[in-house]
Structure formats: structure tokens, C-alpha cells
Image: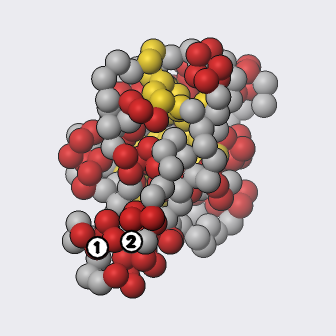
């Protein structure tokens, strides 16, 4: 997707959804050279990856290497730090009290997505700030918007039958590593760690998907506005479309599949 088409779909997404936070793009920086040229401010003190994502939803552009991620679980999930045998075995999850016995802890750990590459760093910034495509898109919002994104996905791809969620490692594993590795969408209920560290509200969820799905998801959301959204939401969408001179979607009032 060229830059102009990419930016237009970002505008369309913001017209169709009432996003209080900016959509975020994630880019893996595989080499030291990639990190050096990445257009974002390097973090100067250790920071949690999920906090970087939260700051990006507020307009900040940051990059960090594996040594500057305060949460080692996040660094391991993103492929910036090697996973040791203790964590791979599930012992850490059992010790923390996340699972009631070792077989459950091991099964949960084996089911979590951890990037198997060895990247140097990662860049996290608002999707609209990218000149070239990132690897993964993350949107944190209320359930209605997450529903609409999944409906947009389903418009072209049908049912996603492999959602992966445990309520743990929500931003790093469920919203970044899994969409990247599976090349598919995932919804996360978030986790206590990121809700505490990043300060998400109790009403927020996350959705992550690879950039390869971005065009179809946005187009799917747009193509289902008339049959999904109510008149009140349609009025807001129509106003934003007119403000952005987008005239290829006719808003139909009193027109829904459920009426």
C-alpha cells in the first residue's frame, strides 16, 4: 500500500470509529542500524513496553532496545531477550500464582506467543506518524469499537476461530507477538500488569493485527457502517466524512440489518 492510500485509510478509520486514543503502529528493529535510523525518540530510562504503547496512543513516538525494557516478560515476548529454561518450563507462572499446578502452567506457557527472532529493538508510535508501513497495528478502545473492528475483519475474512487470550501478557504477547506470528487478528482483554503499569481504564480492551490486514479491516468497517451503526453514530460518521472530503459512502438512516 502506498503512503497516500495508507494515510487515507487512517483517516477513514478515524471517521468510522470514535477513537479516544490514537491507533498505534509497532515496528520491529532487527539490527542496530535499523534502530539508529528509526524515526522515534530513544527511551532514556527503562520502561515497560505496554507503557510505550500507551504513550503512543497519546501521540508519543518512542524506540527501545532490549536492555531498556523494564518488563523482561515483554522483552522476551517481543524477541528482544532470550527466554530461559525457567520461564519456558512454566515455573515462573506457577510461582506467581497464575496457574494452580505445573501442567497447567506449562500448557499456558506453551500456548503463549513469543517471537522467535532476535531483534535489536522496537519502535512504537502513532500509526499516522509512519512514512512506511509498520509490522503490527494496536488499537486500545472501548468494546463497541473493538466489536466494529472485528466486524470489519469478518466482512472479508469470516470468523476468526483462533483468538488467543489468557488475561496475561496482553500487549506484548496477545496484541503484538501473536498477530505478528499468526498474520491474523487477535483481541485481548488486557491484563492486570498493563492495567496497573499503563493505566488503561476498566472499560478498555485491545485489538492487534498485522499491517497486511489493515486495508481490508478499514474497508470492512466502512462497508458495514450502514447495517451496523445506529442513526446517532451515523450522524457523527457522516459529519467526519464530509469534513475530510470523503464522498464515496452514502450514509443510510433508519437502515440496519437488525431493524
Q: Is residue 252 above or below residue 191?
A: above
Q: Is residue 47 above or below residue 206?
A: above
* 196 and 186: which is toward the camera: 196
Q: Which mark is residue 180?
A: none
Residue at image point 39% right, 71% down: 90
Left/right placement of residue 3 relative to residue 221 reads right
Q: Residue 223 in the image: x percent, y percent? A: 67, 47
Q: Which mark is residue 94?
A: 1
Residue at image point 59% right, 16% down: 36
> Dots 2 and 1: beta carbons under 8 Å?
yes
Q: Residue 41 in the image: x percent, y percent? A: 45, 15
Q: Is residue 91 above or below residue 236?
A: below
Q: How many marks?
A: 2
Q: Is residue 16 above or below residue 157?
A: above
Q: How is the image coloured?
A: secondary structure
Q: Secondary structure at mark 2?
A: loop
* Residue 149 makes an appearance in the image: no
Query: Label 2, on which residue?
Result: 90
Residue at the extreme front? 85
Left/right placement of residue 182 relative to residue 144 reads right
Q: Gap between marks 2 and 1, in whole Å? A: 6 Å
Crowding at mark 1 (Cα within 10 Å: few <14, some 14-19, many 20+): some
Q: Secondary structure at mark 1?
A: helix
Amino acid at each position: 500500500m502506498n503512503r497516500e492510500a495508507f494515510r487515507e485509510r487512517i483517516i477513514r478509520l478515524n471517521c468510522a470509529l470514535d477513537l479516544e486514543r490514537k491507533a498505534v503502529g509497532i515496528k520491529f528493529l532487527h539490527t542496530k542500524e535499523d534502530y539508529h535510523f528509526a524515526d522515534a525518540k530513544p527511551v532514556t530510562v527503562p520502561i515497560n513496553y505496554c507503557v510505550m504503547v500507551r504513550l503512543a496512543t497519546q501521540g508519543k513516538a518512542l524506540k527501545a532496545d532490549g536492555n531498556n525494557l523494564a518488563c523482561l516478560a515483554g522483552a522476551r515476548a517481543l524477541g528482544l531477550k532470550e527466554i530461559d529454561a525457567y520461564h519456558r518450563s512454566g515455573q515462573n507462572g506457577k510461582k506467581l500464582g497464575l496457574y494452580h499446578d505445573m501442567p497447567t502452567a506449562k500448557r499456558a506457557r506453551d500456548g503463549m506467543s513469543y517471537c522467535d527472532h532476535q531483534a535489536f529493538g522496537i519502535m512504537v508510535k502513532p500509526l499516522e506518524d509512519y512514512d512506511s508501513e509498520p509490522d503490527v497495528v494496536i488499537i486500545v478502545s472501548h468494546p463497541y469499537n473493538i466489536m466494529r473492528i472485528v466486524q470489519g475483519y469478518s466482512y472479508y475474512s469470516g470468523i476468526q476461530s483462533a483468538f488467543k487470550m489468557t488475561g496475561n501478557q496482553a500487549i506484548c504477547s496477545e496484541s503484538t507477538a501473536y498477530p505478528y506470528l499468526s498474520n491474523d487478528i487477535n483481541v485481548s482483554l488486557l491484563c492486570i500488569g498493563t492495567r496497573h503499569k499503563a493505566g488503561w481504564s476498566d472499560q478498555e480492551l485491545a485489538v492487534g493485527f498485522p499491517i497486511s490486514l489493515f486495508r481490508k479491516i478499514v474497508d470492512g468497517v466502512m462497508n458495514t457502517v450502514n447495517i451496523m451503526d445506529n442513526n446517532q453514530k451515523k450522524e457523527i460518521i457522516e459529519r467526519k466524512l464530509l469534513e475530510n472530503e470523503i464522498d464515496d459512502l452514502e450514509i443510510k438512516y433508519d437502515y440496519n440489518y437488525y431493524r
